[in-house]
Amino acid sequence: MTAKITRRQLAGLAAGTVVTGGLIPARAADTTTLVSGFQLPQNLDPHQVYDVPMQAMMLNTYDNLYRYQNDPPEIVAWLAESHTVSDDGLTWEFKLRPGIKFHDGSEMTAEDVVYSFRRVLALALGPAGAFLKILKPENVTAPDKLTVRFKLETSYAPFFAAIPSVCIVNPRVVKAHEKDGDWGKAYVASNDAGSGPYKIVSEGYRPLEYLDMEIFDDHFLGWKHNPKPVRKIAGRPTKETSTRILSLINGTIDWTDGNLPADQVDQINASKLAFVQKDVVMKTFVIRMNNAKPPFDNINARKAFAHAFNYDGFIKEILAGYATRDPYPQPETLWGIPKDAKGYDYDLAKAKEYVAKAVAEGAPMKRPLEIHVQSENEQSVQGAQLFQSDLAQIGLNVKVVGDIWSNLTNAAAKPETTPDMWVHWVSTYFVDPENWVGQMYDSQFHGTWKASSYYKNAEVDTLLRKARALVKQEEREPLYEAAIRQIMADCPDIWIYNSMQLQGINKRVKGRRFCTVGQGAEVRWVTLES
Amino acid sequence: MARFVLRRCVLVLPSLLGLLVVTFLLIHAGSADPAAALAGDAATPEQIARLRLQYGFDRPLWEQFVLYLNKVSQLDFGESAFSHRPVAHDILQRLPATLELTFAALVLSIGLGVPLGVAAAVKHNSWPDYLLRLLSVMGIAVAAFWFAIMLQLFFAMNLAWLPLRGDLASTMVRPPVVTGFMLLDALIAGRWDVFFDHLRHLVLPAVTLGLGGLATIVRFTRAGVLDTLQQDFVFYERAMGYRWPRLIWIFVLRNSLTATVTQIGLLFGGLIAGGVVVESIFDWPGIGSYTVQAILTGDRQVMLAVTLLVGTVYAAVNILVDVVHGLLDPRLMERA
């Protein structure tokens, strides 16, 4: 008998090897690569995009003067060593640490910080919203190599809270790729221009699909605090929930983002490789009411709706308890909430009473109403359906309308096009009451999605504007408390809960640090165990 | 032949223009303000107004369409509101992955569908025929997303034979992009590890995508072969002593394939469009997931460009099908 292998046998062997993965190294043994399932931002330029996925990316690739760390979040000096502010709150000076290097090896100076802020203002996208009205490009200057000075147009306390939203880019890299005065927009959208602990691998990026990063050994903080850091981050976002869960359970990805559905927690916790980490985040869930449209221009009508939502039922039954009831217009863990504030409870009898009062005042309570939801988000649909069934019990007719985020934010630009009601979350863009009550209930923000209830109260406007112009928290706090007390009495919206982030994590991931800004995606603290 | 192809190409242009007009109108009627989409979540009304002016979204619809048409004629499809990158660039980067998946699904559908269809016809009204008919009906009826999850559960989770998602193991370094087709680029770079790993990642999405086409081809081939088998020339050739395999594969099949070829043409366009779901489930980095994102974010430029692309592919494949028909039956070409 000869040992001759026929062509057919050879083909079969090759196919078998391919199918059984004989040529593929086992990923589980690799303790240097973390596979992250976080959603990728729209593009990689932190000056064009500023949202939750961007926060998760930029914390690893870029640095900022100050940064939010820990839980509850604290703003800590990062690229800056310290800062000072003038008594009038108009002049802010930041002192940079010496010897900070960008990924190309060049040294960071105050001029680079000036360039970064001017770029933010010129592009007028992403994080620019917090600065456009109070900062002119020529008023960001560098008196010396390590000092950056900001001269504001008006005193604006949330300026400091918004500082972590601006990443410092490398002007030498950006300018080299500028086209037609675009501030290197096209280039930075797909490439690295940062100084952060990880740098983007060339050709390792495709929007929405994958992003590969590798460690930057010369990062200014060094790596002494983590002797066995992750060397490579493979960003592999999963689009479908089922694929996300399966990928986590079989070890294809090391962690998901913080948006796992509550009904998947038990399944993941029962798996061998992964568990679900629960963290309270500052992300509120709200049903907006269009105060400019009847019947919501009537306070009794609004209160009727606020008493008709089954808060506990929604949180306990639909969210399986993975949220905390938050009856305030901002996260309950944030300063500025008056101690005597009391929210609206689920009480259909009270709701009926308010309906009767509203009807007596001429409010068209029988008008068919619409509540718009984000169709792709199951939770917003379930919340609206629960609300719809309770409202039906008190004789109110509400139709649930499926919609998408971009349509909703677009419609919210005018009171006439804003839906009667719509459901959304408000995430942490910066940790300050300005991020919630300031931008949601000051009437100067009408036209933005955050202020889409079109609530207007001159007293509240005055309080919020005054609070915004002061620098010291102890002076601002009573003003916010007074404003929130009034807002809650006026009941412009239905405030439901503050979120609990559910993140699936592989058990080999150790050392993760959580902060509500960035959802704990900062990899520099993490180690992978074999 | 050249004149035939040229004539077909010219006739396609008005269809594409019509497609563009309808899509443009539908998207403008139903989707979000493109300036708001470009400006992003944290934008102020002033930022949105500035972009509206900058991109000409404030102009009358017909003017916007003419401007768009002018740009498209220069292969400029505008900027994606989502990625803020040129749409043409994004599509070119992703198209090879979609074509790779589509071709793999098509090869699977044809490679299995034609022999199985022939087998069903030859074994007409026997148990293999019944079984294949049943399976082909199921293949057409089954929902792609359900079938995909079943494949994931069985082959990736239970047996751990094949990867669950993506196009390459996360530990692997991608070969330099030359053609954009990962299999070709891996071969060019001599990266056999990448070649085989990519091939493994291709199996489940290709099977999911190819299932419907496979079932269709089985049915049409079966019907065509059955019909041909009733022809006099088959009786004659059998009487002449031709053996079954030769008779079937050389004479019968050629005369039976007209309807199958038409179906293959339709399938190709359908596979590109159907890839939207499959690519999303398997995180395949093609135009499918890009399109889903565009629809969810109201990214008009991407929606328009992808519609035009799918329309063009349909048209091109139809021309190709006409040519193949002509080659199979030269009388058709002469008549045209």
Image (tube, coloured by chain):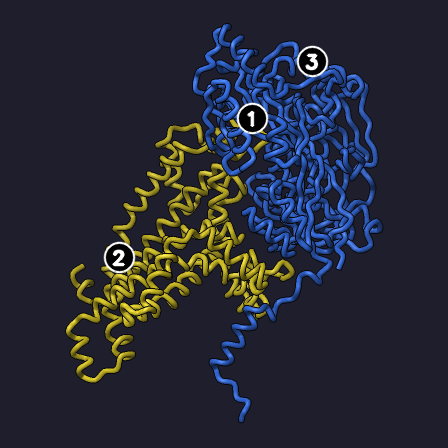
What residue did someone put label 1 on?
A: A449
Question: What is the secondary structure assignment of the residue under circle 3?
Answer: helix
Does residue A6 lie above or below B16 as drawn?
below
For residue B6, the mark is 2
Rendered location of residue A46, percent (x, y): 64, 39
Does residue A501 lie above or below A149 as drawn?
below
Q: Are marks 2 and 1 on the same chain?
A: no
**Count of marks overlaid on the render:** 3
**Residue A473: quarter of image:** top right
What residue did someone put label 3 on?
A: A463
Callout 2 crowding tier (Cα within 10 Å): few <14, some 14–19, many ≥20: few
Question: What is the secondary structure assignment of the residue under circle 1?
Answer: helix
Mark 1 or 3, nearer chain start: 1
Rendered location of residue A408, percent (x, y): 50, 29
At 38% across and 53% down in the image, what residue appears? Answer: B141
Callout 1–callout 3 Cβ contact below 8 Å: no
Does residue A241 lie above or below B300 as drawn?
below
At 70% across and 24% down in the image, what residue appears? Answer: A433
Whether residue A136 is visible, yes or no, is no
**Residue B260: quarter of image:** bottom left
Front one among A491 and A216: A491
**Residue A113: quarter of image:** top right
- The answer to whether A80 appears left or right of A15 in the picture is right
- The answer to whether A23 appears left or right of A362 in the picture is right
- Disc 1: host chain: A
In the picture, which chain is yellow?
A: B
Task: Point out the frontmost of discs 2 and 1.
Answer: 1
The three-letter code of the residue at mark 2 reads Leu
**Apparent colour of chain A:** blue
